Amino acid sequence: MSNAKELQDISREVEALKRRKSVLEDNDLEVMEERDGVEKELEALTTERSSLAAEIERGRLARDQAAGETGLQLDAAEVERQRWFPGWTPAAQGL
């Protein structure tokens, strides 16, 4: 009788382990599916970040170019002012 009881206990334990294995496999599948979604979202965000970084760099270049052009315009205006009003300075006028 002891052998039959041991066999029954082992059989129950095997069934419990099979159920547990099934639950763990289901969890693994859920985690893998979630990971796939997260990886796709990461890829999209990385692409967007690269695009935004490029846009920022284009803006910086445009700003720097505009600042350079403004500097050239100011220099030209100063030359023109000196041509029309030699020796005049803002400091001399109290400005």
Image (cartoon, rainbow, N blue to C red):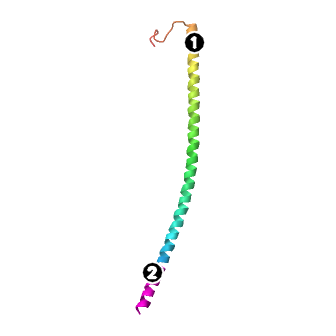
In primary-sequence order, the first of circles 1 and 2 is 2
Q: Residue at x 45, y 87 (%)?
A: 7
Furthest-bottom residue in view? 1
Between circles 1 and 2, the one closer to the viewer is: 2
Furthest-top residue in view? 86
Q: Which residue is mark 1?
A: 79
- The amino acid sitting under disc 2 is Glu
Q: Residue at x 52, y 69 (%)?
A: 26
- The amino acid sitting under disc 1 is Val
| Nearest to the observer: residue 85 or residue 11 | 11
Q: Main secondary structure of the magenta part?
A: helix
Q: Residues within 10 Å of mark 1 (few under 14, many from 20)?
A: few
Q: Position of residue 64 (x, y in %)?
A: 56, 28
Q: Residue 88, relative to residue 27: is it above or below?
A: above
Provide the residue span drawn in magenta.
1-15
Q: Residue at x 56, y 58 (%)?
A: 37
Q: Decide if residue 83 is on the left or right side of residue 6.
A: right
Q: Which residue is mark 2?
A: 13
- Could you tell me which secondary element the residue under label 1 belongs to? helix
Q: Decide if residue 16 is on the left or right side of residue 47.
A: left
